[in-house]
Amino acid sequence: MEKYIEGNKAAWEEAFENRAASWGADITDRVKNEEYPFFYEEMKAVLKRLNTEGAVIGQFCCNNGRELLSLVKSGKAAKGIGFDIAENQVAFANEKARELDLPCEFEAVNIYDIDDSHKEQFDIVLITIGALCWFDDLDRFFAVIAKCMKPEAVIVIHEQHPCTNMLAVEGDEPFDPAHRKECHYSYFEHEWTGNGGMYYMTQKSYHSKTFTDYTHSLSEIISGMCSNKMVITGLKEFDYDISGGFAEIDRSGYPLSMIIEGKKL
Protein backbone atom coordinates (compact mmCIF):
# COMPACT_ATOMS: atom_id res chain seq x y z
CA MET A 1 0.00 0.00 0.00
CA GLU A 2 1.33 3.42 -0.95
CA LYS A 3 2.52 5.42 2.04
CA TYR A 4 0.02 8.25 1.52
CA ILE A 5 -2.88 5.79 1.30
CA GLU A 6 -1.71 4.01 4.42
CA GLY A 7 -1.60 7.39 6.16
CA ASN A 8 -5.08 8.30 4.96
CA LYS A 9 -6.42 4.99 6.24
CA ALA A 10 -5.10 5.73 9.71
CA ALA A 11 -6.42 9.32 9.61
CA TRP A 12 -9.90 8.26 8.49
CA GLU A 13 -10.13 5.55 11.12
CA GLU A 14 -9.05 8.07 13.75
CA ALA A 15 -11.74 10.50 12.57
CA PHE A 16 -14.42 7.83 12.72
CA GLU A 17 -13.35 6.85 16.23
CA ASN A 18 -13.83 10.50 17.21
CA ARG A 19 -17.11 10.95 15.30
CA ALA A 20 -19.89 13.04 16.79
CA ALA A 21 -22.78 11.11 18.33
CA SER A 22 -25.05 12.43 15.59
CA TRP A 23 -22.85 11.18 12.74
CA GLY A 24 -24.78 8.39 11.04
CA ALA A 25 -27.44 8.27 13.73
CA ASP A 26 -30.23 9.04 11.25
CA ILE A 27 -29.35 6.42 8.63
CA THR A 28 -31.71 3.64 9.71
CA ASP A 29 -34.73 5.88 10.18
CA ARG A 30 -34.26 7.88 6.98
CA VAL A 31 -33.57 4.87 4.75
CA LYS A 32 -36.68 3.15 6.13
CA ASN A 33 -39.00 6.12 5.75
CA GLU A 34 -37.75 8.34 2.92
CA GLU A 35 -37.27 7.95 -0.82
CA TYR A 36 -33.64 8.30 -1.88
CA PRO A 37 -32.45 10.03 1.32
CA PHE A 38 -28.96 11.54 1.36
CA PHE A 39 -29.11 12.52 -2.33
CA TYR A 40 -29.63 16.00 -3.78
CA GLU A 41 -32.67 16.49 -6.02
CA GLU A 42 -30.64 16.59 -9.24
CA MET A 43 -28.92 13.34 -8.29
CA LYS A 44 -32.24 11.75 -7.37
CA ALA A 45 -33.53 12.58 -10.84
CA VAL A 46 -30.55 10.83 -12.44
CA LEU A 47 -30.87 7.74 -10.23
CA LYS A 48 -34.62 7.45 -10.76
CA ARG A 49 -34.23 7.15 -14.52
CA LEU A 50 -31.63 4.40 -14.23
CA ASN A 51 -32.71 0.78 -14.38
CA THR A 52 -31.85 0.04 -10.75
CA GLU A 53 -34.51 -2.60 -10.04
CA GLY A 54 -32.76 -5.96 -9.75
CA ALA A 55 -29.38 -4.37 -10.45
CA VAL A 56 -26.06 -4.96 -8.72
CA ILE A 57 -24.65 -1.61 -7.59
CA GLY A 58 -21.11 -0.80 -6.50
CA GLN A 59 -19.99 2.29 -4.60
CA PHE A 60 -16.32 3.18 -4.42
CA CYS A 61 -15.31 5.18 -1.33
CA CYS A 62 -18.63 4.53 0.38
CA ASN A 63 -17.85 6.20 3.73
CA ASN A 64 -20.49 5.06 6.27
CA GLY A 65 -22.61 3.36 3.61
CA ARG A 66 -25.63 5.64 3.79
CA GLU A 67 -25.87 6.47 0.08
CA LEU A 68 -25.57 2.89 -1.11
CA LEU A 69 -28.12 1.73 1.45
CA SER A 70 -30.44 4.50 0.29
CA LEU A 71 -30.09 3.61 -3.39
CA VAL A 72 -30.45 -0.15 -2.92
CA LYS A 73 -33.61 0.28 -0.86
CA SER A 74 -35.30 3.04 -2.88
CA GLY A 75 -34.14 1.69 -6.25
CA LYS A 76 -35.10 -1.93 -5.42
CA ALA A 77 -31.65 -3.18 -6.36
CA ALA A 78 -30.73 -6.84 -6.04
CA LYS A 79 -27.45 -6.13 -4.26
CA GLY A 80 -25.09 -3.36 -3.25
CA ILE A 81 -21.37 -3.63 -2.53
CA GLY A 82 -19.46 -0.72 -1.05
CA PHE A 83 -15.71 -0.26 -0.75
CA ASP A 84 -13.87 1.98 1.68
CA ILE A 85 -10.41 2.00 3.21
CA ALA A 86 -11.48 2.66 6.83
CA GLU A 87 -12.16 -0.64 8.56
CA ASN A 88 -14.27 0.85 11.35
CA GLN A 89 -16.48 2.71 8.87
CA VAL A 90 -17.00 -0.48 6.91
CA ALA A 91 -17.96 -2.36 10.10
CA PHE A 92 -20.46 0.42 10.87
CA ALA A 93 -21.93 0.23 7.36
CA ASN A 94 -22.33 -3.54 7.59
CA GLU A 95 -24.11 -3.11 10.92
CA LYS A 96 -26.56 -0.66 9.31
CA ALA A 97 -27.19 -3.09 6.44
CA ARG A 98 -28.12 -5.77 8.98
CA GLU A 99 -30.38 -3.37 10.89
CA LEU A 100 -32.18 -2.48 7.66
CA ASP A 101 -32.18 -6.06 6.35
CA LEU A 102 -30.88 -4.86 3.00
CA PRO A 103 -28.79 -6.90 0.53
CA CYS A 104 -25.71 -4.74 0.99
CA GLU A 105 -22.21 -5.65 2.02
CA PHE A 106 -19.20 -3.46 2.58
CA GLU A 107 -15.51 -4.29 2.19
CA ALA A 108 -12.48 -2.61 3.73
CA VAL A 109 -9.97 -2.30 0.92
CA ASN A 110 -7.67 0.10 -0.90
CA ILE A 111 -9.52 0.78 -4.17
CA TYR A 112 -6.31 0.25 -6.13
CA ASP A 113 -6.10 -3.28 -4.69
CA ILE A 114 -9.59 -4.56 -5.58
CA ASP A 115 -9.01 -7.93 -7.21
CA ASP A 116 -10.70 -9.94 -9.97
CA SER A 117 -13.31 -11.38 -7.60
CA HIS A 118 -15.42 -8.35 -8.54
CA LYS A 119 -14.67 -8.48 -12.27
CA GLU A 120 -17.67 -7.44 -14.40
CA GLN A 121 -19.96 -7.56 -11.37
CA PHE A 122 -21.72 -4.19 -11.41
CA ASP A 123 -24.59 -2.88 -13.50
CA ILE A 124 -24.28 0.55 -11.89
CA VAL A 125 -21.35 2.31 -10.20
CA LEU A 126 -21.82 5.20 -7.80
CA ILE A 127 -19.18 7.75 -6.80
CA THR A 128 -20.08 10.66 -4.54
CA ILE A 129 -18.56 13.76 -2.99
CA GLY A 130 -15.05 13.47 -1.63
CA ALA A 131 -13.91 10.30 -3.38
CA LEU A 132 -11.67 11.29 -6.30
CA CYS A 133 -9.35 13.52 -4.28
CA TRP A 134 -7.85 10.61 -2.32
CA PHE A 135 -6.11 9.12 -5.37
CA ASP A 136 -3.04 10.47 -7.11
CA ASP A 137 -3.66 8.56 -10.37
CA LEU A 138 -7.19 8.70 -11.78
CA ASP A 139 -6.33 6.56 -14.79
CA ARG A 140 -5.39 3.77 -12.39
CA PHE A 141 -8.47 4.46 -10.27
CA PHE A 142 -10.87 4.23 -13.20
CA ALA A 143 -9.08 1.14 -14.54
CA VAL A 144 -10.08 -0.69 -11.36
CA ILE A 145 -13.65 0.57 -11.61
CA ALA A 146 -13.94 -0.38 -15.29
CA LYS A 147 -12.74 -3.87 -14.46
CA CYS A 148 -15.62 -4.23 -12.00
CA MET A 149 -18.29 -2.98 -14.45
CA LYS A 150 -20.25 -5.21 -16.77
CA PRO A 151 -20.26 -4.25 -20.46
CA GLU A 152 -22.76 -1.39 -20.91
CA ALA A 153 -22.83 -0.74 -17.16
CA VAL A 154 -23.34 2.88 -16.15
CA ILE A 155 -21.38 5.11 -13.78
CA VAL A 156 -22.68 8.21 -12.01
CA ILE A 157 -20.33 10.66 -10.28
CA HIS A 158 -21.65 13.47 -8.06
CA GLU A 159 -18.61 15.43 -6.98
CA GLN A 160 -17.24 18.78 -5.97
CA HIS A 161 -16.44 20.84 -9.07
CA PRO A 162 -12.71 20.97 -9.91
CA CYS A 163 -12.88 24.77 -10.08
CA THR A 164 -13.17 24.81 -6.29
CA ASN A 165 -9.59 23.52 -6.14
CA MET A 166 -8.39 27.03 -6.97
CA LEU A 167 -10.14 28.60 -3.98
CA ALA A 168 -8.73 29.16 -0.51
CA VAL A 169 -10.85 28.12 2.44
CA GLU A 170 -10.87 29.30 6.02
CA GLY A 171 -7.60 28.28 7.63
CA ASP A 172 -5.56 28.62 4.42
CA GLU A 173 -2.94 31.36 4.47
CA PRO A 174 -4.30 33.28 1.42
CA PHE A 175 -7.95 33.07 2.55
CA ASP A 176 -9.76 36.41 2.47
CA PRO A 177 -13.42 36.34 3.60
CA ALA A 178 -14.10 39.44 1.52
CA HIS A 179 -12.90 37.73 -1.69
CA ARG A 180 -14.05 34.12 -1.40
CA LYS A 181 -14.13 33.53 -5.17
CA GLU A 182 -10.58 34.76 -5.76
CA CYS A 183 -8.40 31.99 -7.21
CA HIS A 184 -5.15 31.28 -5.37
CA TYR A 185 -4.11 27.77 -6.40
CA SER A 186 -3.31 26.03 -9.67
CA TYR A 187 -6.26 24.40 -11.38
CA PHE A 188 -4.02 21.66 -12.73
CA GLU A 189 -1.76 20.55 -9.90
CA HIS A 190 -2.02 20.65 -6.17
CA GLU A 191 -1.18 18.17 -3.43
CA TRP A 192 -2.54 18.98 -0.01
CA THR A 193 -1.55 17.59 3.36
CA GLY A 194 -3.08 18.53 6.65
CA ASN A 195 -3.63 17.59 10.25
CA GLY A 196 -6.81 19.52 10.86
CA GLY A 197 -9.05 16.48 11.14
CA MET A 198 -12.49 15.91 9.63
CA TYR A 199 -14.75 18.47 11.27
CA TYR A 200 -17.87 17.40 9.35
CA MET A 201 -17.60 13.97 10.97
CA THR A 202 -16.32 14.89 14.43
CA GLN A 203 -17.85 18.36 14.93
CA LYS A 204 -14.67 19.35 16.74
CA SER A 205 -11.19 20.58 15.96
CA TYR A 206 -8.29 18.28 16.78
CA HIS A 207 -4.73 17.61 15.65
CA SER A 208 -5.22 14.58 13.45
CA LYS A 209 -3.03 12.07 11.73
CA THR A 210 -1.99 13.32 8.30
CA PHE A 211 -4.48 13.42 5.44
CA THR A 212 -3.10 13.67 1.90
CA ASP A 213 -5.29 14.48 -1.07
CA TYR A 214 -4.94 15.58 -4.69
CA THR A 215 -6.83 17.93 -6.95
CA HIS A 216 -7.88 16.83 -10.43
CA SER A 217 -9.01 18.90 -13.40
CA LEU A 218 -12.21 18.08 -15.25
CA SER A 219 -10.15 16.92 -18.23
CA GLU A 220 -8.18 14.56 -16.00
CA ILE A 221 -11.41 13.02 -14.67
CA ILE A 222 -12.96 12.62 -18.11
CA SER A 223 -9.72 11.36 -19.67
CA GLY A 224 -9.40 8.78 -16.90
CA MET A 225 -12.86 7.49 -17.71
CA CYS A 226 -12.44 7.55 -21.48
CA SER A 227 -9.06 5.79 -21.43
CA ASN A 228 -10.75 2.92 -19.59
CA LYS A 229 -13.49 2.26 -22.14
CA MET A 230 -16.13 4.54 -20.67
CA VAL A 231 -18.03 7.04 -22.78
CA ILE A 232 -19.43 10.22 -21.24
CA THR A 233 -23.21 10.30 -21.57
CA GLY A 234 -23.96 13.35 -19.46
CA LEU A 235 -22.35 16.29 -17.69
CA LYS A 236 -24.16 18.84 -15.56
CA GLU A 237 -22.55 21.63 -13.54
CA PHE A 238 -24.13 23.46 -10.61
CA ASP A 239 -23.43 26.54 -8.52
CA TYR A 240 -24.48 24.92 -5.26
CA ASP A 241 -22.12 23.47 -2.69
CA ILE A 242 -22.21 19.78 -1.73
CA SER A 243 -18.91 19.78 0.17
CA GLY A 244 -19.84 22.01 3.09
CA GLY A 245 -16.78 24.14 2.45
CA PHE A 246 -18.21 26.89 0.25
CA ALA A 247 -21.56 27.76 1.81
CA GLU A 248 -20.79 31.49 1.69
CA ILE A 249 -20.67 31.49 -2.13
CA ASP A 250 -23.50 28.99 -2.60
CA ARG A 251 -25.64 29.76 -5.68
CA SER A 252 -23.59 32.84 -6.57
CA GLY A 253 -22.69 31.71 -10.10
CA TYR A 254 -19.37 29.99 -9.32
CA PRO A 255 -19.21 26.28 -10.34
CA LEU A 256 -19.26 24.27 -7.10
CA SER A 257 -20.54 20.79 -7.97
CA MET A 258 -21.21 18.51 -10.95
CA ILE A 259 -22.75 15.23 -12.06
CA ILE A 260 -20.95 13.14 -14.66
CA GLU A 261 -22.64 10.13 -16.25
CA GLY A 262 -20.84 7.48 -18.24
CA LYS A 263 -21.26 4.04 -19.79
CA LYS A 264 -18.77 1.23 -20.28
CA LEU A 265 -18.33 0.07 -23.86
Image: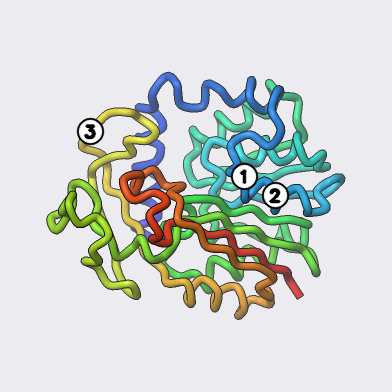
Nearest the eye: 81 or 199: 199
- Cα gap from disc 1 to disc 2, whole angstroms: 6 Å
Name the element at disc 2. helix
Q: Residues within 10 Å of mark 2 (few under 14, many from 20)?
A: few
Q: Residues within 10 Å of mark 1 (few under 14, many from 20)?
A: few
Q: How far across and how far down the image is residue 140, in percent?
A: 53, 71
Q: How far across and how far down the image is residue 221, in percent?
A: 51, 71
Quarter of the image with the C terminus is: bottom right
Sooner in the amino-acid sequence: mark 3 or mark 2: 2
- Residue at image point 24% right, 55% down: 180
Q: Is residue 55 left or right of residue 127?
A: right
Query: Which amino acid type is shown beneath numbered disc 3?
Result: Tyr
Q: Residue extending furthest front? A: 252
The answer to whether residue 156 is above or below residue 140 is above
- Residue at image point 70% right, 23% down: 33
The label shown at residue 206 is 3
Q: How far across and how far down the image is residue 216, in percent?
A: 41, 68
Q: Residues within 10 Å of mark 3 (few under 14, many from 20)?
A: some
The reply to whether discs 1 and 2 touch (Cβ–Cβ < 8 Å) is yes
Q: Quadrant of residue 98?
A: top right
Query: Which amino acid type is shown beneath numbered disc 1?
Result: Glu
The label shown at residue 41 is 1
- Residue at image point 63% right, 25% down: 30
The label shown at residue 45 is 2
- Cα gap from disc 1 to disc 3, whole angstroms: 33 Å
Nearest the eye: 139 or 40: 40
Q: In this view of the protein, can residue 1 be seen by the observer?
A: no
The label shown at residue 107 is none
Query: Which amino acid type is shown beneath numbered disc 2?
Result: Ala
